[in-house]
Image (spheres, rainbow, N blue to C red):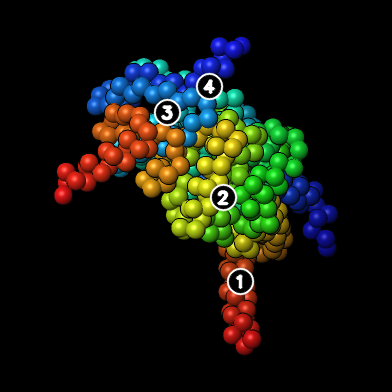
Amino acid sequence: MNMFQFAFMQNALFVSICISILCPCIGIFLVLRRYSMIGDTLSHASLAGVTLGLLSGHNPLLGAFLFTAVSGALIEWLRSYFKKFTDLILSIVLAFSVGTAITIISSGKLSANADSFMFGSILTVSREDMVLILILSLLSVLTLILLYNQLLYIAYDEEAARVAGVRVRLINYVFSILVAAAISVSIRIVGVLVLSSMIALPVATALQLGKGFRPTLLFSIAFSFIDIMLGLVVSYYLNVAPGGFSALVSVAVLLLVIAGKQLLGAIRTRQAAAV
Amino acid sequence: MSDAVKLPKVEISQLYFSYTGTGPYVLRDINLCIESGEYISVVGDNGSGKSTLMRLLLGFLKPQKGSLAVRASRLAYVPQKNDFSNASFPITVFEMMNAYRRLLKLKSRDCIQSALAQVGMQDHTRALMGTLSGGQHQKILIARALMGQPDLLILDEPSTGVDIDSQNEIYRFLKKLNREQGLTLISVEHNLDAALANSTQIYHISAGQGHLCSPEQYAAELLHRQRSLS
């Protein structure tokens, strides 16, 4: 029986495609700016948004998007306050957001279970979620295309970007919103706990290939697609959470690529020695 | 209009700067006037305030007191090679140049090849920036700065991390840009030989205060200092 004949699997497939495009597009800038942990902090922060959404009777994904965007802007603002202790900022935002989430969950006032957002689930993607995910994905991809050169230069050489007239601070705030969008799109399937793996690991894998920026971005999307699709299909048959399994696949793919690279290097060294 | 042409490229008057917002000041009572077509080397010991002055000129910092006017229609900047700890950043020479061209809103891609050709790096467009030698890297950054035809070029220690042959090549090129094309250059320098050989004037900063002198005067000051030390 074809598993994609089920409506919930079709929904999950659609969301997975959105995740596989959006997460590496955001992740490449986070990884290259050495901000991978911001992705991790914000994905945890999104849980507070989910619980606030459930508590107020609104769409939890919308809650996640708004709360994560505010948390991202807060990180950006605190960066200028704690210039020399940037890792401290992440602890502050993590304490505030996870504290909020735990307080709300433990109060027993939630009308729905927040567990599926922590571990990810293919059964819970609603029609309303899909519309929101589609809008957020389209807006994010458009913004990324428009700000591609600015984001690339802020990541590569922020001072040169400023001299060229790029409004670095403003674009950093816009980027916080993009990170929030990528996280909100992903939490239904991937879950809060392993979401940062979808942001960082496909990029880490693509970086092993030693290509330029654009090919690295395209390979990141390709690896992300492989990770999520394998995670989705296998988790269906194993009856496990797709987020956790996708994270395992992404680690496995990274290790395979590293092993392949080492093997190729060894073969080339041997061939060079033989000549 | 003719008055605007006569105005100095850079004019700094009674400038004070401190990173804390109050004293002690890193730079004190800085007065400097740089005319178009000058090649100024800013020299001084580590921590004297020369990099702070450069960051003020670039607009990254704002002075606490005094005035600073940079009258460039297009300002360009060449960072120190060592600032690029990001050697693993996946970007080719072409991608780096092309993204910068788009930031400068230059329509034609031809400016990339012509800027690279000026520094003899036109055959390296496909190379990853991280695989270039120090000298090649610095030449590419100079080429990037030349896109869009700047009228003021600020350089931060252009010979740091660069081999001797490339250093000579880079300084010959900078001197040519200044003398033949009239490009105004301000270079923060630790290489005193290069500063003496190429600059039209030298701005020496010591303990936050500076003075402008000719290369000959500065050479005499150095000689005097060496004699008094021995």
Residue A106 visible in image: no
**CA distance for labels 4 and 1:** 52 Å
Residue wearing tag 1: A261
**Tag 4 near tag 3, CB within 8 Å:** no
Which label sits in the foreground, 4 or 1? 4
State the CA–CA distance, disc 4 to disc 3.
Answer: 14 Å
Tell me residue A173's x, y (percent). Answer: 55, 31
Q: Which residue is denoted by mark 4 in the rendering?
A: B71
Q: Label 3: state its secondary structure.
A: helix
Identify which amino acid the numbered label 2 is placed on. Lys
Front residue of A45/B100: it is B100
| Residues beneath discs 4 and 2 located on the same chain | yes
Neighbor class of circle 1 (other Cα within 10 Å; few <14, some 14-19, many 20+) is some
* Residue A211 in sight here: yes
x 27%, y 42%: residue: B222
Q: Specify whether disc 4 shares its chain with disc 3.
A: yes
User: How far is the residue under mark 4 from the one under mark 2?
Assistant: 26 Å
